[in-house]
Image (cartoon, helix red, strand yellow):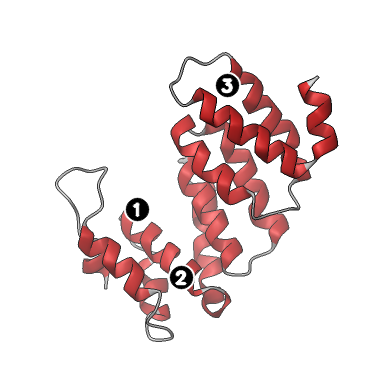
Amino acid sequence: MRFCIGDKRPKPDEMSAVAGAAYLVLSKMVPESIDPLITSLSSPDVQVRMLAAGALAEIGPDAKAAIPILEKDLADTDPNTRANTALFIGKLGGNLDSFLPVVIEALPQMDPSDLDNFLGRLSDYRERNFAIPILAAILDKTEHSTNCYTPALREKLVNALQQANPTATNNLMQ
């Protein structure tokens, strides 16, 4: 299993079709795939760990035994790894108070092109009022950016703020 989800493309930022297919198939091979996927969470290869974690998250609460192993990646230096891991733990049935703050705290450290994806995934959690100050700070910083993602990112940030608390958002926008 490690070979399949560890298959590499020549370019480091591309995933092979074999690894992508393995990710999709392994999440459907329940319960046989759960233990090997959990074992893969200890791989030194970040692609293997993240694809295994993603497949386990697609399985959902039946793979809840993976949570203690995944929790080590909540302290990773990469904000995307921390945020993805936190969201995977959420899909496995983890405690909202444990994983959602990790996602929120990672947002300001993300590249704008990655932030968009996490804002969309954050909308699944209505209990995110505590994210308002961080989202507002990112919005303020984005206003002065010349990044080509700025207009779309600003729109996503405003939508995330409106979903979190429409009244607070109206006050921010005045």
In this figure, which residue is indicated by the disc labeled 1?
46
Q: Determine contact: label 1, label 2, CB under 8 Å.
A: no
Q: Which residue is mark 2?
A: 56
Image label count? 3
Tell me if label 3 and label 1 are in contact, CB under 8 Å.
Answer: no
| Circle 3 residue | 142
Mark 3 or 1: the one toward you: 3
- Earlier-in-chain disc, 3 versus 1: 1
Labels 3 & 2 near each other (Cβ < 8 A): no
Secondary structure beneath dot 2 equals helix
Q: Position of residue 62 (x, y in %)?
A: 54, 80
Q: Quadrant of the N terminus?
A: bottom left
In 3D space, how far apart are the residues under numbered discs 3 and 2 (Cα atoms)? 34 Å
Answer left or right for 81 relative to 20: right
Mark 3 vs mark 2: which is more N-terminal?
2
Q: Residue furthest bottom?
A: 31
